Amino acid sequence: MSVKVAEYLGQRTDVNNPTIAPASRGDMCPFMDAPCKKLVPQQLQKPICSVRKGDGQLWIVCEHRLCATKKTARRAGVRTPRPIRLNEYQKNRIMEIARLIYGGAIGENDILLKREAPVPVGGDNSNYKADFVIKRRNVVGGEVLEMQGGGETSNTGHITRHVTDWENMPNRTNEFLRETIAQAGTIETNAWRRQQEQFLIKGNVAEKTGHGRIVFCVGSLLYDYLVSRILGAGLRDIRDHGWTLALIAFKEDTSRPPQAGAIPLVIDHEKTLFTTYSSFVRALTDQGEPYPPLFTEGFEDL
């Protein structure tokens, strides 16, 4: 169990120049047109976007890293929040997904989009919000697009102390910032557990509404975790035959040598699954084997 800081406020640490500077309150997030959420006064966390596991795999730890969904941001001393425009990073990410699910010839003018769209569930009148809802212009129906970022780490305090030590160094270096933190690790299970309820409900609403599908975008590590849980279900890829659920993994783009800036991400085309919502839910819930000793052995008298 160990991790390394991979990105600090959108700057990868595995290049030595330029030297990364400590962040300040109110610094902008490189992945959306708004201040970094971790640097606002209510949070004051370290602006770590992603970490690397001991084997080098990337683990996203910020909810806004893959593709931020916020549509307003508050300004200091101003009560009315300002609208957040989609920046080029967000547009490119959404178009990459759209070209995969709709076909490569589609362009930006063909796509309509909503952010943080309400998803009513009835009953206690509680509402969920879809990260994005996208659709093709002049086409009935659309896709609920969920962006899974913000995976957890264990012993996060060790990561925080390491970054604080780096920030306080008189002659700080990127090499020190990316040093191994042996006491910390990643928690893939919590990332899925935290999203499971919303994922199931939003997918169900999309399917019941008619002509609706759900697209779940995750990092490669979380994709591997999910697929490992449904290996025995024999789900077939039905990309060309009426799919209603897509699972899409993003990986680090290693096609070029590391360059200063953010770590480039791309769709991992070897880690995509197009199936039906009902088949996927059935695969998730139909787990475990009969175990008769559970009810016949090892009892004690009250």
Image (spheres, rainbow, N blue to C red):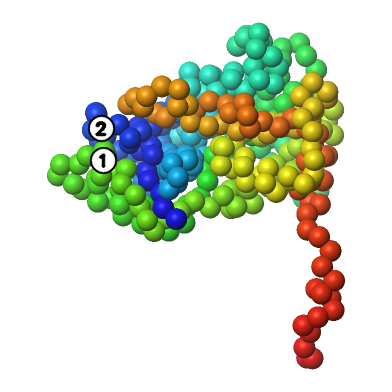
- C-beta proximity under 8 Å, tags 1 and 2: yes
Residue 290 position, x and y percent, is: 84, 64
Q: Spatial distance from mark 1 to mark 2, Cα to Cα?
A: 7 Å
Which residue carries the number 2 mark?
A: 16
Query: In the rendered image, which residue does mark 1 sit on?
Result: 175
On the rendered structure, is 272 left or right of 39? right
* Residue found 47% across the figure and 39% down from its top: 58
The residue under the point 56% across, 49% down is 188
Where disc 1 sits, the SS reads: helix
SS under mark 2: loop
Which three-letter amino acid code belongs to the residue tagged 2? Asn
Left or right: residue 267 versus residue 240 is: left
In this orientation, does residue 157 appear? no
Q: Earlier in the sequence, mark 1 or mark 2?
A: 2
- Closest to the observer, 285 or 76: 285
The image position of residue 35, as x and y in percent, is 40, 33
Q: Is residue 203 left or right of residue 146?
A: right
Q: What amino acid does circle 1 point to?
A: Glu
